[in-house]
Structure formats: structure tokens, C-alpha cells
Image: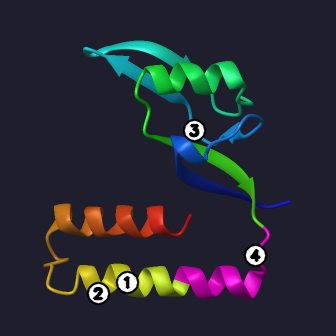
Amino acid sequence: MAIRLRYLPLSDVTEGMVLGAPLMLPEHGVSTFSLPLGHVLTDTNLHQMAVRHAEFVCIQQEDTRSDDERAAEIAESEDRVRHIFRTADLSEPLMARLYGAVLAYRRQ
């Protein structure tokens, strides 16, 4: 089973979803609430996140796309990133690293 990471607004997150990345919520620069990668969210967790003004949560979801659909979406995403960076000087190391990081993120 393939897993897909999705960043969802808290309003779309429901009990039973699984965290795709550790969650840390700071208050005045101090971490006041955290949950580990793979944690199954409960109603209490969702309430605690809302009270602490969480906006987005990384969730693991089963990837039901076919290999062809997945490849088409990746190609479309890569084309979009190339278009965004079309005027960037990729011979500059910092810009090249940023471009690579954005491409890697969009391939998820």
C-alpha cells in the first residue's frame, strides 16, 4: 500500500487520521504541544490543536492513484516548478539548491 502525505487545514482533519510528520505547536516561542509521526489523532488531540490555533496538519493517506496518474501529476508539478523558476539563475548554488528542494517537495 502506497502512502501519500497531505497537508490539510485543521478543519478537514478528522479523528482517526494518522500524522505524516511530527506536530509541534509553539506558544510564545516555547513548544506547548507535540505529537509524534504516526500518531493516530483523537477528538481530544483535535480540540487541543484548535485551542492552540493549529492551521495545517501533515496527514498520511493511502495513495489510491494509479502509477500512470501519479506519474502524470508529478510531470505536471515539475513543469509548473520549471515555469516558476524559468528566469532564475540555476548556476547560482543557493538558487540551484532551492530549485532542487522545491522539486523534491512537489514530487511527494
The residue carrying pointer 1 sits among few (fewer than 14), some (14 to 19) or many (20 or more) residues within 10 Å by Cα, namely some
* Along the line of sight, the residue nearer the viewer: 61 or 94: 61
User: Along the polypeptide, which appears first: circle 3 or circle 1?
Assistant: 3
Compared with 41, 11 (above or below) is below
Where does the image place residue 6, in percent across and percent down from the top left? 58, 55
Q: Secondary structure at mark 1?
A: helix
| Residue that numbered label 4 is attached to | 65
User: Along the polypeptide, which appears first: circle 1 or circle 4?
Assistant: 4
Where does the image place residue 4, in percent across and percent down from the top left? 67, 59
User: Along the polypeptide, which appears first: circle 3 or circle 2?
Assistant: 3
Do the residues bearing badges 2 and 1 touch, measured as CB atoms within 8 Å?
A: yes
Q: Quadrant of residue 31?
A: top left
Q: Quadrant of residue 80?
A: bottom left
User: Along the polypeptide, which appears first: circle 2 or circle 4?
Assistant: 4
Where does the image place residue 59, in percent across and percent down from the top left? 63, 46
The label on residue 80 is 1
User: Along the polypeptide, which appears first: circle 4 or circle 3?
Assistant: 3
Q: Amino acid at mark 2?
A: His
Q: Secondary structure at mark 2?
A: helix
Q: Amino acid at mark 3?
A: Ala
Q: Where are the magenta residues, as a range?
A: 64-74
Picture residue at 35% right of the left edge, 78% below the top: 81
Do the residues bearing badges 2 and 4 touch, measured as CB atoms within 8 Å?
A: no
Number of marks drawn:
4
| Residue that numbered label 2 is attached to | 83
| Helix, strand or loop: magenta stretch | helix
